[in-house]
Amino acid sequence: MKRMSIRPILIHPDPRLKKVAAPVPDLSDDLRRLAEDMLETMYDAPGIGLAAPQVGVLERLIVADAVKDPDAEPQPMVMFNPEIVLSSDETNVYEEGCLSIPDQYAEVTRPAEVRVRWIDMTGEPREAEFDGLWATVLQHEIDHLNGKLFIDYLSPMKRQMMTRKSLKIKRERARV
Ligand code: K2U
Ligand code: ZN
């Protein structure tokens, strides 16, 4: 059985990060392998979330593990075709980062609680409510499936500054 592999993460600006990802028609072993690779890539980064477009796959699949306590059991979450079906009026502010916009953080305000519907790894439909960091991460990842980045919530000035810095990092990493 081929072991899982860590996949390269696309760095902003990249047109693939701005596209709307296609719904997953139905589960396959390839999609399950992709989800496993995304979890391994996320933990390796390290990160607490990752969306398929970030590894160049324009399909509606996200993974997350928003358990920040290093001693706690990891809680890997895999969601195919996730949808937010309800979000609270109350909001939360969190200093977000993004593995596709390295080393830059900014405060983003989002609904504090969301109810999400998705298909899980076994192909079963699921529905649950999330609050706290889980709510933030899942909204951030689902935004990725719609070509939206956390910097899109910032002022044009701030967004431009962070894009320029990300481009600089991207070019440095591209040089051998
Ligand atoms: O790029 C991503 O989607 C991974 C994001 C997940 C995230 C979403 C919302 C708020 C924080 C993080 C991060 O880059 S993972 C790295 C990280 C971990 C904890 C806190 C901030 C950033
Ligand atoms: Zn991100």
Image: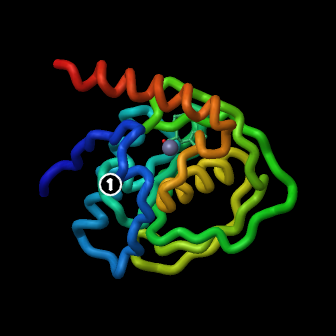
Whether the residue under disc 1 has CB within 8 Å of ligand 1: no
Left or right for 152, reference 114: left
Residue drawn at 60 percent across, 48 percent down = 137
Report the number of numbered marks: 1
Q: Quadrant of the N terminus?
A: bottom left
x then y, percent, for residue 74: 51, 44
Left or right for 174, reference 144: left
- Location of mark 1 (residue): 36
Q: Quadrant of residue 111?
A: bottom right
Left or right for 73, reference 158: left
Residue drawn at 47 percent across, 23 percent down = 165
Residue drawn at 60 percent across, 28 percent down = 105
Q: Quadrant of the C terminus?
A: top left
x then y, percent, for residue 23: 41, 74
x then y, percent, for residue 28: 26, 74
> Which of the four quarters of the rendered structure image does ligand 1 lie in?
top right
x then y, percent, for residue 71: 57, 32
Secondary structure state at the residue bearing disc 1: helix
Residue drawn at 18 percent across, 49 percent down = 3
Q: Nearer the viewer, residue 162 or 82?
A: 162
Q: Amino acid at mark 1?
A: Glu
Q: Is residue 63 visible?
A: yes
Q: Is residue 71 visible?
A: no
Left or right for 174, reference 95: left
Q: Is residue 114 above or below residue 162?
A: below
Q: Is residue 82 above or below residue 105?
A: below
Q: Is residue 151 above or below residue 16?
A: above
